[in-house]
Structures are given as structure tokens and as C-alpha cells.
Amino acid sequence: MWSERPTYFPEVTGHLPPLRFVYLGLALLSALVQALIATQAAQDAQSSQYQQSLVGIAMSLLMGVLSNLPNFPMRWIQCGTILVGYAWVLISAFLLESAPDLCASILIGQLIFTTFSFSWLRQRSALLLSSVTYLLLWVPSGPDSMLDRPPLLLTGFAMSLVWFLSQYGWHVYLERNRKEEFAALAFTDYLTGIANRHSGRELLERLFVEHAGAPGGLSVALCDIDHFKRINDTVGHHRGDDVLIEVARVLQASMAPQGGHAVRWGGEEFLLILPGHSLLVARKVVERALIEVQGGTFPERVQVTLSAGVACMAEVGDVPGLLRLADQRLYEAKAGGRNRTV
């Protein structure tokens, strides 16, 4: 029962130290809340609420200590939290003196640990534990009990909602994530992780309109890796992909401080978009970026250089003209010996 792995929630293992801190924080927060309740109950002379809070403090501190033990399995902490939580609910309902001030906290506790059960256990295990505990809460709900039937009925309905959300809400979450991933793939280059040609063209069209008549305007640079075929032949196509990834990383890092964008334009070609940059300023930025590429970390210590052609929207009237001019200057850079900006 306890070794079963959840079917729709990912397994949480002990190899995630930050998660231990989260559990420790939750345990300490629970202890703090119980301490505040105990203080208020002591002032109001509510002995049953005070005793219930003391039990809650002890259990919370115990789980906090266990969650901070590096060799203690996280799975045990999860199962222990659920068992301790249900025990706290039943102790509150059976062993402490019945009083109106306990009813709300007992039912809220039942809902909280039902949520934990459906989050951390298989559906059957969660259903069994939550149902048995819920049915046991009906035992003291006689005519003289403070656990009234209407709140218990509402709690049962809320538990069914928790089950529904845990069972079907997770699938909805996965489907939404899948759609978001597909949308990201449509606008992101699968290899380098930067914008692809489609999204880069859309961005350029939008920025061209936004910067029409603005000081500095908009500049672009078409960059091409020099002798990329030779690099592929030397280190292999797989390592050639590593070269593309590193070039994209360096260009993206170089553009970000300038408010610019790097786009995988196709093959070994990249488009740099520099909003608010005149032709002269953009050329200097691109020259620095090309120097940074030469200092990148490439496989087999291969030497990588780029040629670039820079164009400004002030020189043309539309986006196609801007790209044609940048492409023409890129050709001039390659014809002039490569590893240069024109």
C-alpha cells in the first residue's frame, strides 16, 4: 500500500534537498499556527481546543525533525505526514473532550489530509484512508456530539471534489502543459532554444512598425558561421550541432543587455534584431558579439568565426528590403575574407 507509486503525480524522491526545506517550512508553519491557536484557547479557557493544539504542535515538530534528516526517505515523510494527520483528526474527535470549538478544526484537518492523500498516494490507497477516517468521524456524531451532521455531509462532498480535482485536474494540467509545449515548439528553434525563423520574422515585423520614425530606429544583422561545412566534416555533424548551440547561446547573451534578440534564421545563419540602434551603433554591438563568439567554448577546440551584414530601417522602406540589404552586406563580408562585419 505504502510502496505504491502514484499513477498521476510524479514521485518525489530523497534526491531533492530543496523539497526537504519546503516540508520543514510547512511543518514549522503548522506548529506556529497551532501555537497561536493554543495561546488563544488558553486565554479563552477552551481546554479541549488547547489540548488539541498541543497534540498538533507535537506532531508538526516531529514531522519537521524527520524532514530535516538527510537519510530519512522522503516517501516515508509523505506517508508519515498523512498517517500523523489522520491520527490527529481522530484523536481530536475521540480522545479529547467534545466541544464546539473543535468541530471546525477537525473537519478542516480531514480535508487537508485528504488532499495530501490524493496528492502522494495511489488513488485506491487515498480513497481507503480518507473514507475510513471520514466514516470514523460519524461514530461520535450522535445527538449529543458537537460534530454536527450537516458539516460532516459538506465535508464528505468537499472530499469528493478533492478526489475529482486530483484525478481529472492533473490530466487537464498535463494537457495544458502539452499545448504550451507545442506552442513553444512552434516559435522556438528545437536545437538551440532561441527564437526560430517564424517567430523572429513576426517579431521583426512588429518592431519595425513600433520603431517607425523613432530615434535610432531599428537595425538587424544577418550572421553566418564561416566554413561551417568544414567544421562539420572535421568534428562530425553531432559536434556541429554543439557549435550551433554555443553560437546561439553567446549571441543571445550578447544581445540581451542591448535589448536585442537572437534568431536562428536557418542552417548556420542567425538574425540579430537591435531595436533603437542606429546603423553605426548596431555595427559596433555586432562586432563585439562576433568577438565574444570567438571566445566561446566549442568542441574539439574548433575555431569558430562569424561574418555579418548589418542594415538599418532608415535605409529601406520595409522589412523585406531590410533583410535583403542585410543579406547583401553579409555576402560582401564573406567575399571580403570572412570574420568581419559590413
Image (cartoon, rainbow, N blue to C red):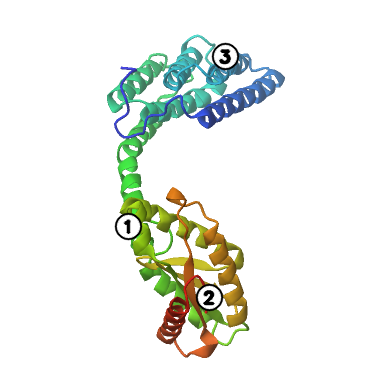
Q: Residue furthest right?
A: 43
Which residue shows up at 38% across the image and 59% down it? 231
**Relative image position of residue 263 (x, y in whole percent):** 44, 67
- Residues at circles 2 and 3 in contact by the CB criterion of under 8 Å: no
What is the number of the mark on residue 55? Answer: 3
Sort mark 1 into few (<14), some (14-19) or many (20+) by Cα contacts within 10 Å: few
- Residues at circles 2 and 1 in contact by the CB criterion of under 8 Å: no
**Relative image position of residue 42 (x, y in whole percent):** 69, 18
What is the number of the mark on residue 233? Answer: 1
- Residues at circles 1 and 3 in contact by the CB criterion of under 8 Å: no
What is the number of the mark on residue 341? Answer: 2
- Could you tell me how far apart the alpha carbons at marks 1 and 3 are, in whole angstroms? 71 Å
Quarter of the image containing the N terminus?
top left
Which residue type carries mark 2? Thr
Which residue type carries mark 3? Val
Which residue shows up at 47% across the image and 73% down it? 338
Which residue shows up at 35% across the image and 19% down it? 129
- Could you tell me how far apart the alpha carbons at marks 2 and 1 are, in whole angstroms? 26 Å
